Amino acid sequence: MDRVVLKNSVRNFRSKGKTYSEILSIIGTDIPKSTIAEWCKGVRLPDSYWKKLDKINHYNYLNARRAAWLASKQKRERLLTKLQDNKSVILDKLRDKEVLKLILSSLYLGEGSKWKSHRGLMLGSSEPDIVNLYILLLNKCYGIKINQLKCRISYRADQNIRALEKHWSKITGVPIENFYKTKPDPRTIGKITSNKDYRGVCVVSCAGTHIQLELEAIPKIILKGL
């Protein structure tokens, strides 16, 4: 095709709202996109082009977002596979009580009450795995049994405290009679809980100020030692 005729065809397609990629697909040549762009300088685009461009950009954004999500998912899966492959090594280390104390002290540092504000062990979380890990580590490290633990539930005003206590008793194994009465958060009165999976915060406590002080001291020793 004559180059002048080709250029006019390109400009005509562009004036009808075709993208550069669409034009290249129609004319079927190996002309660089930069040349197409140069030829189309000054061409007035129809209003419909900008709506189409918005749709294309939105489509590309969704594709890029999905690609990023898939890449992140694959990365997580590789990490979990690696951890499973090293499971026996990890479990071997967990047979050492001192290693378990390090884990417990780190957990307590983030979630537990500190000595200056409360005497004795107390930790609260809305995550069952965190609460159960804490209970398990107390037993493994210090021999504290389930029936020595007391629990209370921090909950919202529109929630049923009895149902929450039964829920957490079943999850943790702490006897229902070891749960003591609490009042709902007054800030939530008149407000609806939007997260239907929220089961309040389970606060686990027991005597053991000396253990509390030890758990608080371990992170400080680590910080100074490293």
Image (cartoon, grey):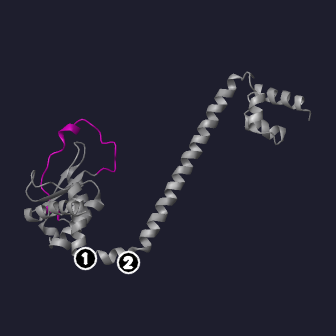
The amino acid on which the numbered mark 2 sits, given as a three-letter code, is: Ser
Q: Are marks 2 and 1 in contact (CB under 8 Å)?
A: no
Whether residue 207 is visible here, answered yes or no, is: no
Residue 117 vs 187, above or below: the answer is: below
Q: Quarter-wise, where is residue 55 in the image?
A: top right
Residue 27 in picture, x, y percent from top left: 84, 38
Q: Which residue is mark 2?
A: 88
Q: Is residue 148 left or right of residue 72?
A: left
Residue 129 vs 100, above or below: the answer is: above
Q: Which residue is mark 1?
A: 96
Mark 2 neighbour class, 10 Å CA radius: few under 14, some 14 to 19, many 20 or more:
few
Whether residue 75 is visible here, answered yes or no, is: yes
Q: Which element is circle 2 on? A: helix
Name which residue lies at 19% across and 42% down: 185
Residue 184 vs 79, above or below: the answer is: above
Based on the picture, tell me whether residue 192 belongs to the magenta stretch: yes
Nearer to the camera, 30 or 162: 30
Tell me the magenta residue range.
175-198
